Each structure stands twice: as C-alpha cells, then as structure tokens.
Amino acid sequence: MGGARVVRRATIRGVEDPAVAGLAAVLAPEGLALLDALPPYEEAAGLALGARLRAEGHDPALVAGALTQSRLRARAVAKFGPFADDMLFTAAGLEQATRLEVAARHARRFAAADVRRVADLGCGIGGDALALAGLGLGVLAVDRDEPTAAVAAANLRRFPAAAVRCEDVVATDLTGVDGVWLDPARRDAAGRRVLDPRRASPPLSFAVDLAERLPVGVKTAPGIDHDLVPTGPGGAWECQWTSVDGDVVEAALWSGPLARPGVRRSAVVVRGGAAAVVDDAADPFAATAPPVGPVGGFLYEPDGAVVRAGLVGAVVAALDGRLVDPSIAYVTADRHLELPSATGYVVDEVMPFGLKPLRARLRERGVGRLTIKKRGTAVEPEELRRRLRLEGPEEAVLVLTRVAGRQSALICRALPRPIAV
Ligand SMILES: C[S@@+](CC[C@H](N)C(=O)[O-])C[C@H]1O[C@@H](n2cnc3c(N)ncnc32)[C@H](O)[C@@H]1O
C-alpha cells in the first residue's frame, strides 16, 4: 500500500483558520493531555472553564480547540457511545460519520466475504474505518481534506494495520487492497444536501468502475431511486436500507461477494440495539402487487427502511394481511403478530374523515392525548390537533389515510413492540 503521502503523525497546514489552529493544537501530545483532563462537558460552564485555562497559561488556541473537542465528544456519544471519549472530531466530520452500530454492520460484510484489506475512500473522521480496523481488518483510509485526515489518523492510532492518506481518492494506489468502502460526501459547495449519488463526491460511477476489479460497498442517501442501483459489474448488487430506532439512515450498495446471493433489495431494522433483516427473498409480492382489502382488527405501519426498500409485501405476507389501499404502505390483518419490521396498532374504529364527527367520537372516548399518523392525506396533523380541541384522560393513535381510495380516520391503540428480535 505504499506510494502516496501517508499521514503518520497528525499534522495539518492552514492554521490561519481558528478552527484548524485549535484542532492542530489539540493534536499535539500536550493538547490531547489537556483535552483528556477536562471535566465532563457542560455547556454552561464553558466560558468560565476557558477563562480559567487561559489564566493558568494555556495557549488560547489550544483552549479553544480543547473546548470544541470536548463539546463534539459529548455530541458524538449518540453515534459512538463510550468510544467518543477517546476520539477527535471536526463538526462536519461528526455530522457525516456513520454511527458505530451501522459501521459495524458494514465491517462485518467485508469480514464475511473474506476481504482482509479494505480501502475506505473518503474516510472522514474514520467512523467506518474504525469499525473495519476493530474487526482486525487492514485499512487504508483516504480523505483529501487535511484536518479531516489528521483526525482520522488520530482516531485510528491504536490500530497498527490502519494507514491514513491525505489525497484525492482518484489518485489512490489500491495495490494490496482487496475491497473498497465508499461513503461519498453528499453536500455541494454551498453546503446543500445532494441526494443523487451520481452527483456525490466521489460519484456513483467511480464506485461502479472500481467494482470491475474489486468488491465495493457504497453508502447512499435512503431516497436513492431504485433504478440507480447498479446491476453490475462484479455480479448483481444488493441495496440495503438501514433504519436505526425508526430513522432511515442510509441505503448501502454492495457488489460482488459483498452482496448476498439472490438478494437484490433488503432492509435492516435496528431498534434498541437489536437488528432484524427483511429481504426480497421473503417478499412473495416482489413481482406482483400485494392484496388489498378491508381494514381488519389490526393495522401495521412498516418500518421506513422496509418501505424504502419496497418490501411492504414481506410484511403483508408475514401477517397474512392486506394493504388498506394499493398505493399506501399501511398493512391490515385480522390477528396480531409481533414483527420487528412493523409497528402494530389495535383498530378500534374506522370512519370517513370529517372534522366534526371525528371530534365528537374522540370526545365520547375521552381522548385527551392523541398521536396522529398519516399517509396519503394532505391533512396537517398539528392544525387538526388544534381544531379537535382534545379533552379527557384517555390516549389514542389516530391514523389518517386512504382506505380503498377514500379519506378515512382510524382510531387505534398502540401495541407493545418487541424489544429484541
Ligand atoms: C460522508 S464523509 C465520510 C464519513 C465516514 N464514512 C465516517 O464514518 O466518518 C465523506 C468524506 O469524503 C471526503 N471526500 C469527498 N470526495 C473526496 C475525494 N475525491 N477524495 C478524497 N476524499 C474525498 C470528504 O472530505 C469527506 O470527509
């Protein structure tokens, strides 16, 4: 893996930028020591702590850098748990980083396919690279942004089999690498989100070209158009949508041995630390439309990853159920089954949508606390809530949707969710 510049020590140019100067100061051994000695981060105590550290003679750039890192570490706990306390960040790098549990799933794909040395092209602060290195894989992490590459090098310092290079991935020598991970930057020069993977940096075409010679995994936005999922080279690709605690966080494309045989679309639902996978092999309606029929005793809201993956049919099949409308992702069934891939509700009443009758029914039921869910309707939940003037001790879930083409209101109750699958 030799050749281009290797960031061995975390050094950065461009220290005229205060944020970069602060980071450079923290990256020096005495800077890290100061950061590690700081008390747990508390927003309100920041100013006084900064003044005290400067009064004690610490360089103002280092103090600013250490306080910034302390704040970023606190924020990073949501993505990296206790490991955040041993890491460094840039604000943008943290925002873009893959959360630990998802990065671990990426890394396991490479390990399962017996890919031993992975190039992480566009590594950011190293979220994915750390998970790969943590599994004992060799890692070549590359980022063209110098502060970001320096932070990645610091974060990977405990892994001798990991190297970081600061260069454009187009120039990276992949000799000795036997698989590639890409998490392209999805912001344009003005900071706006780029949803089309063909316009990300590097673009999807770069990943597809690499797949001619190496197994490739590439992260994209969850809204990726199914038609953009490559069908080759390197054999058929798998696109896997992932949600974490209800938020769809990504769609990852996997080529060659990284794709599971016979699986083109899949969804992984991570909730409370447990994960469940649904794939098109479990969807008997992959090529035909699922059945549609009247609302039964239970309503199920498939997880967003399942919906994005186009696998609502797998939920219909698992429940022996039907859709309430051909174009809407609500599934109804006559019996209850706990599924990790869908949230279930007991249906108490179904009525045509209308403000006055709905208000009257909720009053009669004494509903004062209402969760409003909607699909396929223009109703504004908060405006509706205001106009319902709720009162009473009871709780309910109101589902607004089309049933057989008609705007309807379903008064429901939540069912418990499984916490482990
Ligand atoms: C979404 S972030 C990667 C986040 C990373 N997976 C993590 O978990 O921390 C994308 C990174 O790609 C880098 N990048 C974008 N285009 C690049 C290119 N052509 N060469 C090298 N790095 C690039 C950006 O600087 C950015 O840090």
Image (tube, grey):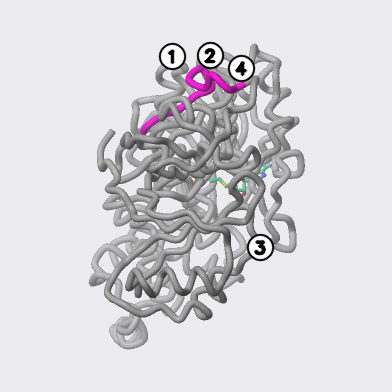
Relative to 236, is 201 above or below? Answer: below
Q: How far, Cα to Cα, is label 1 from label 4?
A: 12 Å
Q: Quadrant of ligand 1?
A: top right
Give, as a three-letter code, the residue at label 4: Leu
Question: Where residue 12 sits in the image (x, y, percent)?
Answer: 55, 56
Image disc number at residue 257: 2
Asked if marks 1 and 2 touch (Cβ < 8 Å), the reply is yes
Which residue is labeled 3 in the image? 378
- Nearest-to-viewer mark from 2 and 4: 2
- Element type at marker 4? loop
Which residue is labeled 1 in the image? 114
Question: Where residue 208 sits in the image (x, y, percent)?
Answer: 71, 25
Give, as a three-letter code, the residue at label 1: Asp
- Quadrant of the image occupied by residue 64: bottom left
Image disc number at residue 214: 4
- Nearest-to-viewer mark from 4 and 3: 3
Residue 311 appears in the picture as rendered: yes
| Left-right relation of 94 to 229 | left
Relative to 203, is 55 above or below? Answer: below
**Callout 1: CB less than 8 Å from ligand 1:** no
